[in-house]
Image (cartoon, rainbow, N blue to C red):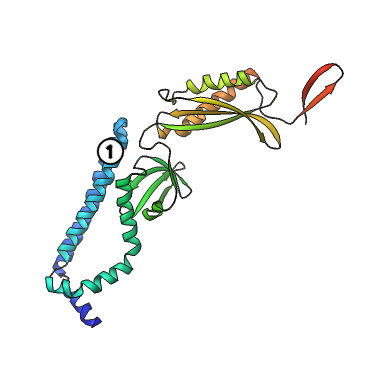
Amino acid sequence: MELQNVQSVLGMIRVGGLITAGVVLLFTVLLARTLTSVLVRAGDRFLERRLLLNQVAAFVRFGVYFIGILLAVVSAVELRQETILALSGTIALALGFALKDLASSVLAGLTILIDKPFQVGDRIMADGTYGDVVAIGLRSVRIATLDDNLVTIPSSRFLTDKVSSGNAGELNMLVQMDFFIGMDQNVERGVQILEEVLTGSRFCYLKKPWVVLVNQVETGGHFAVRLRAKAYVLDTHYEKPFESDVTRRLMKAFAAENILPPARLVRVVGGDAPPTMELVA
């Protein structure tokens, strides 16, 4: 019985159609890559439309591959009705076991495209990987990390694991930066300098609210004052240049104002003089 099923399956394959199917698949890959490349380059040129064009590229690539694979199968396989009916159960069972994981990832990819927990161009944290979504494919999602690595994660992982999106479909994104100064330093002046440096950065998106928060923390076994800056960057691509620009200019301004980093201090009390703080080596 099994031998008959195998013979029936082999009888469905058209040898002459295999070449056509190969040509169709090759053309499908080239077309998908070309259209994706064109749309991505257009997004890099027209920044205000970049995320939209990246989303269109994901749908186009998905559609081209689906149609191409379907045409290749039709070209290579002779779909006779009686053969299909006879072998439908066997083929379905075999494919069910062989393609279970692939089917799960494909359905997950469709869910991502429709539900949009994130989209191409978003900067996300997923499965311990932080970076930009560059492709949502039939089977997997590709993320370009900030150190220029391309990480591929099966789409099915995104249906069960937590995913955080920093920009949620927008170009701008909230960036949080922490800076520390000593307990005995001029906190008010430090906040003022940080505000000036933050809003003076060419990467800062001032159309959204920004803030500098102050609190006392313990770091390195001693207390310090933490200045936490929260502001939006113009484009997710400038996240690290934004942090670098603010940090560099802030350190220069703090040095000019003699605002020092945290250090271990002791309180000295003596006589009628008010208590003072002294640095411990």
In front of the other: 96 or 120: 96
Q: Horizontally, is 54 left or right of 266 in the view?
A: left
151 relative to 261, above or below = below
In front of the other: 214 or 101: 214
In front of the other: 117 or 74: 117
Q: Is residue 233 visible?
A: yes
40 relative to 172, above or below = below
247 relative to 65, above or below = above
Q: Which residue is mark 1?
A: 53
- On the image, the x and y values in percent for residue 104 come to 34, 59
Q: Which residue lies at the image location 24% right of the left edge and 49% below the top edge?
A: 32
- On the image, the x and y values in percent for residue 166 come to 43, 38
Q: Is residue 23 visible?
A: no
Quadrant of the snapshot with the N terminus: bottom left
Q: Horizontally, is 67 left or right of 244 in the view?
A: left
Q: Horizontally, is 172 left or right of 245 in the view?
A: left
Tell me the kind of residue under disc 1. Leu
- On the image, the x and y values in percent for residue 63 come to 22, 50
Q: Quadrant of residue 76?
A: bottom left
